[in-house]
Amino acid sequence: MDAHEELVLRLAQKRSIALGLSSSGYAELLLAVREDPSSFMDDKGDEALLLVQKALERYDASLQDDDLLDDDAYLQTRQRRMARMRQDCAAALAVDPQCTDARLLDAIARDLDVDPYLELLLDILDDSPEPSWSDGGAADAWDDVFARPRLRVRAAIVRALFDSARYRKADEWAQGLLRDAPSDFLGARHTSALALARLEDEEGFEALDARLGRRGDSWSALSRVILLYKLGRLGAARRALLGYSRLSEGAAYALLRPVLKETYMPDRPCAQPYSYEEASLAVHEADPVIVDVPDLPAWAEAIPEIEGAARDYARKTGYDW
């Protein structure tokens, strides 16, 4: 979540509507807002979003040295990090109790088990009003900056449904998000692909892939491997995995040596297509499915080319093997 950019866009859009500016006038206004957003803040919602921005900046900065910590120190640091996020969210909500982003971040920082977390997310969505400044007419809801908080809550619900093994529901919610915001900046397609693979829904998976223009990424590639493996088409699964490994240098290592990923706050991190970082995110999100298919990693490691690619990547990067 780029809270600063969203604050700038919200401020500019509200002022533009109030003044009835043309598109060229809006462009000039946007430059002025970027120069000094504080001069254009005129309601509690803006103040709360600024506090959310600062909370996220503080949270991101606190992640920098995690790789240097042992397990006990990491857990203690993480507890403090989440506690500070909750404090920051409380401050934002004291300014604007209707700040959906602050409520979402607070829900994540509570570190609840998945079922009470999902229930809390659904309550936030039900209580979240459509903002009065929203134009409501965007073909892609993401283009309406005032709609983004609710979209983020819906994306979090999709992931929580998946993590709680409600795979069909996860896909249904993901498909709804894709219909409303087809640009899919929040990556609903990734969870949909993994859910369809777990459900062995090849027809649904291929329809999703076609709908997205067959543009590949680590989630779709890994989902295809899982789908074919679960369908018992091991030759096709092997070819799919080899193809994925050739596209992504770190894919084999990510699958065979998965790593812990920090909680998304609130969105999944950006990663270059077919990078190791993207592959490791996909494996992290696929964990509920891979746990249900426990033979898959061993099957993959028994493929000489995959084991060799993983070893080569570990040797090249200095990662543990």
Image (cartoon, grey):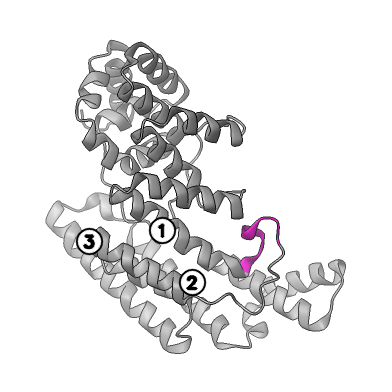
The local crowd at label 1, few if under 14, some if 14 to 19, many if 20 or more residues have their Cα within 10 Å, is many
In this view, the residue in front, 252 or 69, is 252
How far, Cα to Cα, is label 3 from label 1?
14 Å
Report whether 225 appears left or right of 130. Answer: left
Per the rendered image, the range of residues in magenta is: 138-145
Tell me: residue 288, above or below residue 305: below
Residue 39 placement (x, y as % from top left) = 66, 84
Q: What is the quadrant of residue 59 in the picture?
A: bottom left
Q: Identify the element where label 3 is drawn.
A: loop
How far, Cα to Cα, is label 1 from label 2?
19 Å
What residue is at 40 percent from the left and 22 percent from the top?
245
Residue 174 placement (x, y as % from top left) = 48, 49
Q: Earlier in the sequence, mark 1 or mark 2?
A: 2
Q: Earlier in the sequence, mark 2 or mark 3?
A: 2
What residue is pinned by disc 2? 53
Can residue 274 be seen here?
Answer: no
Magenta stretch holds residue 64:
no
Amino acid under label 3?
Answer: Asp
Amino acid under label 2?
Answer: Gln
In this view, the residue in front, 165 or 146, is 165
Specify the farthest residue to the left: 72
